[in-house]
Amino acid sequence: MTVELVHVEAFLVVAEELHFGRAAARLRVDAAQVTRRVQVLERSVGARLLERTSRRVALTPLGRDVHASLQPAYEALMASLAIARTAAESTEGHLVVGFSDSAAGHEVDELCRRFEGAHPEARLELVNVGLRDQVQALESGEVDVLISWLALAGGEVEAAAPLARRQRVLAVGAGHRLARAQEVSVEELPDLRLPKWVPSDPFLVRMVEAFTPEVTPGGRPIPRNGPEVQTLNDMASAIARGKIEHATVEGVVLFEGNPEIVVLPISGLPPMELGLLVIRGPQNARVRAFLSVAARLSAEAAEQA
């Protein structure tokens, strides 16, 4: 039988009051519920901890020993939880924010600058977690918040706040036949050599599908029939050498900062939503403050658009 904190609390209060009615009033439950909770603890121990008669309640010898050991442990636990609650409600402390190269940009810089200005008591650490490892870094607790593409949310990973919208672009080599085009239609993607990520995993599958749909709006399948790549550096090298074309988003420095690569807009695809991802559930005050700054920044950008 599993003993829970409420069972321990019931025993400790009854041991102090030596009266089930007064214990029930302190615990804000009825006396019968207090009795059941104490009985759970007694069954777990395998012996009576309280002697009960119609006129009095008293601790058994074993009950006195159990009370003497449980009371300081309970008080230490309550003190630790109080400290933890205080820390969770304070923006003072360390906040680790992860991002990948594809998400880097002026929006991220501005978000961090705004947060540090509003919360100088917090220690913000910005960590490049890599393309493949970003969701794992969030799930493992290596980072508190992940700046990435909201389309990657799923399972325990929750889209918490939008940050920016980035247009879809096609990255091609400077000598490519499309390099001088003004734009490329999404309906042309099936005719290109889009790369295959290896080794594939559920996260990469989700990412590839987010960046490039499986089918064009006109119904043409978009195959990934180009050479295999494992990293963004592999990708940039293959693009520059004219081996592949890559559908991505504007602002990726690895592509746009390379003189051997040209990026041109893709018409027919909606922008990608960049934002903040967190693990589903309650967040501490530092994370909540960071999300709040991101939401304000996004609202300002929407007003100016």
Image (tube, grey):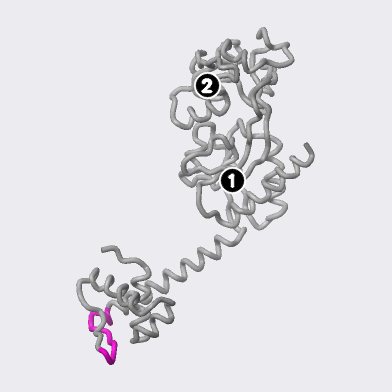
Say which mark, if any, is on residue 160: 1
User: Which amino acid type corresponds to the residue marked 1 in the rendered image?
Assistant: Ala
User: Which amino acid type corresponds to the residue marked 2 in the rendered image?
Assistant: Glu
Would you place residue 174 above or below residue 112 in this image?
above
Is residue 57 within the magenta segment? yes
Q: Find the magenta span and give its range.
A: 54-65
Give SS at disc 2. loop
Q: Residues within 10 Å of mark 1 (few under 14, many from 20)?
A: many
Residue at the limit of the structure toward the right, as seen here: 304
Residue 300 screen position, x and y as percent: 75, 44
Callout in the foreground (2, 1): 2
Q: How many marks?
A: 2
Residue 241 screen position, x and y as percent: 60, 11
Q: CA distance from mark 2 to mark 1?
A: 26 Å
35 vs 99, left or right, is left
Residue depicted at 23% across the width and 83% down the height: 61
Would you place residue 186 above or below residue 155 in this image?
above
Say which mark, if any, is on residue 214: 2
Residue 84 screen position, x and y as percent: 50, 63
- Quadrant of residue 289 within the rendered picture: bottom right
20 vs 140, left or right, is left
Give SS at disc 1. strand
- Quadrant of residue 127 within the rendered picture: top right
Residue depicted at 77% across the width and 36% down the height: 305
Among the two numbered marks 2 and 1 on one chain, the one whose residue lies closer to the N terminus? 1
Q: Residue 292 versus residue 101: which sits nearer the camera?
A: 292
Q: Are marks 2 and 1 in contact (CB under 8 Å)?
A: no
